[in-house]
Structure formats: structure tokens, C-alpha cells
Amino acid sequence: MAKKIIVAGLGHGGIAAAALLAEAGYNVTVYESKKEGTLGYDWTDIFDPKAFKIAKIDMPDKDKYEYKEDMTFVAPDGVTKLSQHVPHDKLEIKMERKELYNHLIKNASDKGVKIVYECEVQKPILLGNRVVGIRTSKGDFFADLIIDSCGMNSPIRSKLPSSLMIQRNVTRQQKITIYRAFYNKASDEEVADRFKVLIRPEGVEGISWIASEKDHTDLLIGRFEDFSQEEADRFAEYLRADNPQLGTEVIRGGQFVEIPVRHPLSVMVADGYAAIGDCAFMTVPLIGSGIANSLKAARILAETVINDKTQGFGVEAMWRYQVLFYKHLGTGLAPLEILKNLMFKFTLDDLNYCFGSGILNDYNVTLTADFGSFYDQIDFTDINDLLLKAKQACADTELLKKMVNTGNKISLVTAACLAIPRRWDRKLVEIWANGYDRLF
Ligand SMILES: Cc1cc2nc3c(=O)[nH]c(=O)nc-3n(C[C@H](O)[C@H](O)[C@H](O)COP(=O)(O)OP(=O)(O)OC[C@H]3O[C@@H](n4cnc5c(N)ncnc54)[C@H](O)[C@@H]3O)c2cc1C
């Protein structure tokens, strides 16, 4: 009889893994709290389209997406700018979230995945240290493997016993609160920088964007603190002075949400359990993109499950998923949390200086468009650029100290990722995970 797999939550990685596993002959059921047809947000997302191929999903029809235009990054001073120049073969796509969900769900349903909607997952069911099922609003369900795709605040991950060594919560600095809305377009005047990313605007720790589209203006406000609708309205009004295209009527979205911006889980598997997507913190910590990484992780997870010779899905077998995830994605992602933390360590003057002095340049911001790794951020072959960065940093000793500290931390985090135990050994993994988590 086919082994039973439960996917808890219809997250992007979960539904992509479900499709690959159903295609391989597993009996896969997804339990999702929302109503059929209501998944996703009322806005567009940007991601690397190569993820479809990796997850063995057809590209959506051409009329369902468009290529994203270059972004302009604006320093906290509001004046100094750096511009992306993304080459054609690296372009990300922009797609309606709801269309993306439709595409992923159709792909999974065609491959035999069953989906139960309006079913709230409440907690894991354990037998000893093994996750054997889920308690839901529609009863208890049991399976040979539970894939946790319930997002950042998963009621499964956050209720696992501490003996499984899986982190249950995130700190305030490890998640960003987002307000996003599409406003009416208030002016037809030509806009110079159509997609502006604002770094710490008004000095507040966070990142925002304002993008001028054909028939609306897209505003995203991201902060490392909770903020109210009144504050979002006030900030929008503040932006209108320099961005007359930003109207006052919210035509789509207008919601507060949270995204994890931290290193991936140090332990993401247990006996009968694997976390994926935002639940395992697979977003790019600098910008919060997680769709492509979730889809890519789905392939790694599905292949781990299929290749488990015992088909028992014990922690020893599932650990291979984590090792491969770190090899292909995690080792590049984790150091980006150290860069994100510069938001709290660098003064506004430091950031303005980095933008204006050449320490950061157009090339560096271009790579934010299609990268999954810290190492893509630096062109190690461009000696002149490296020398300029070093020279400019040396001109400010306080900044230099911070940069050297950051460099050291990045080396340590990278070394820790590379030193992940290749095989599951509880004691060894515990020592490794504690050491790795302490670096952040
Ligand atoms: C405002 C915003 C903008 C973003 N923009 C981008 C972007 O442009 N590009 C990009 O790559 N990423 C973007 N992201 C991040 C991206 O959404 C996630 O990284 C990605 O979707 C992976 O998350 P996930 O699918 O694992 O989890 P989620 O998207 O959180 O999905 C979890 C699923 O589980 C369900 N669920 C949760 N709890 C339960 C429960 N108790 N019972 C049953 N079901 C449950 C939810 O309803 C949901 O369907 C953005 C996120 C936000 C919030």
C-alpha cells in the first residue's frame, strides 16, 4: 500500500513537494485552513522563474506573468541612489499571487494530490518523539510523514516538544512587519525611478518600496516593529510629497502581514516530520523573498523521501534533506541575516556613506534581483572594486570596525553551515545547532 503523507498548510513548498510525491506514487493529502479559491494575497509577487523547472512544474502561460523592471535603491538620506541593471537571462518575473496559487494547485491536483480546505491544523500528534499525525478542526489525521508547510507561525512547529531541538519561535528582529497596498494612480506625469526601494526611510529600521505601475501605485512598508494603520497612512502621505503618483484610494490589498527574515532552521526534521518554506525560514533574509527557495526545497525534500531506502522517514533519513538544503541554498542564505542585521548596527550616516562612496555600487544592488547567496553579492574577480571598497571603508575607522566584525561573522556563519554534520547523530547535531544559532 502507498505510504501516506500529510502536508499541513498549503504553502508554496508544501504543495510543490506534494505534487512530486503524488507523482511518485505516494498517497498525499494537504490540509489547509482557508476556503478553496481564497488562497494568496491580492497583489503581485516577484521571484526567480527557474524555480518552476527545478520543482518540475511547467512555466505558467505567458499572459500570466511579466518581467520585473529594474529597481532603484535609495539611501536613508533620500537622495543618494544606486540602480539595478539586470541582464535579460537573470530577470525575475512578476505574477499575481492568486494566479501562482492556481498554477501550483492545478499542477498538484493533476498529479493526484488531495486537498482538504477549511480545515484548521491545531497541533501535532506525537508517539514518543515521532510525529505521527495532526489534530485539526475536522478531526485527527495520521500519516507516515508530516510535511509542515503552515508558514512562519506553524501550529505544528511551535508545539513540538523541545526534545526535538526544532526552534519554535522567532524574535522581533527576525521577522519584518509589512503593510502593502495598491493605491490609485494620482498623476500621469512620467516618473523617473519607477520602482524605488527605500532603505530606512525617515530613519526607521526597515525597508519600503514604491512602484509606479500602469494603472496603480504599489506601496510596501516594511518595519522591524509593529505599526498601525494610522502610521501607514501618515507615511504614505509623507511619501506623496516626492511621489505625486501615489493616490489616496486603496484599490487592492491594504493588509498587514509578517515575513521571517532570519537564517533557516538549525533543525528542520524529526522522526516523521519535515518543515518547508516560511515554516523553516527559507526566505532571503535581506528582502523576504521565499517563493523560489520554497519551490527549490520541495524538489530536495521529495527526492529525500523517495530515496529513503527504509521508507520509514526517520530523522536519520530526513536529515539528508536538511544537509542538501544547506548545501544548495542554506549556506548562501544564512550569512544574509548578518547583512540584514547591519540595519540595526549601522548608523544612518554609515548607510549613506556606503551608498555614496562606492562601498556599495550598482553591481551589488543588481545582484539582489536574482541571487540566493551572500557570495553572489561580491565580484571577487573585480580587484579594482574590492580595492575601492577597502579604501573607502578605511577612511572611517568606526565603520571599518563594523565592517570587519560583519566580515568575521559572515565567515563564521559560512563555516558553521559548511560544517553541518553529514549524518544524523543526536549529540553532534545538538552541539552544531546550538553553536550555529548562537552566531546570530
Ligand atoms: C507582503 C508579502 C510580500 C511578499 N513578497 C514576496 C515576493 O515578492 N517574492 C517572494 O519570493 N516572496 C515574497 N513573500 C514571501 C512569500 O510569501 C513566502 O516566503 C512564500 O510564500 C513561502 O511561504 P510558505 O508558502 O511556506 O508559507 P505561507 O505563504 O505562510 O503559507 C502557509 C499556508 O499554510 C496555511 N496555514 C497556516 N496556518 C494554518 C493552519 N493552522 N491550518 C491550516 N492551514 C494553515 C495558510 O493559510 C497558507 O496557505 C512575500 C510575503 C509577504 C507577506
Image (spheres, rainbow, N blue to C red):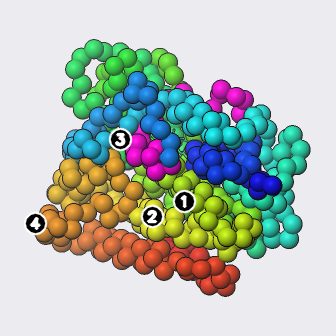
Q: Nearer the viewer, residue 50 or 276?
A: 50
| Label 1: which secondary element | helix
**Quadrant position of residue 32:** top right
Question: Residue visible at 60% across and 80% down?
Answer: 423
User: Residues at badges 2 and 1 in contact (C-beta under 8 Å)?
Assistant: yes
Dot 1 amino acid type: Ile
Dot 4 amino acid type: Asn
User: Residues at badges 4 and 3 in contact (C-beta under 8 Å)?
Assistant: no
First in residue order: circle 2 vs circle 1: 1
Q: Which residue is the extreme one toward the bottom? A: 427
Dot 2 amino acid type: His
Q: Which residue is mark 4?
A: 384
Q: Is residue 178 visible?
A: yes
- Horizontal relation, residue 26 to residue 319: left or right: right
Image coordinates for residue 260, horizontal then vertical, percent: 55, 52
- Horizontal relation, residue 66 to residue 97: left or right: left
Magenta region, residue range: 33-55
> How far apart are the two marked residues, 4 and 3, measured between alpha carbons?
29 Å
Q: Which residue is mark 1?
A: 300
Q: Which residue is mark 3?
A: 92
Question: What crowding class fits label 4: few (fewer than 14 Cα within 10 Å), some (14-19), or many (20 or more)?
Answer: few
Image coordinates for residue 317, horizontal then vertical, percent: 66, 71
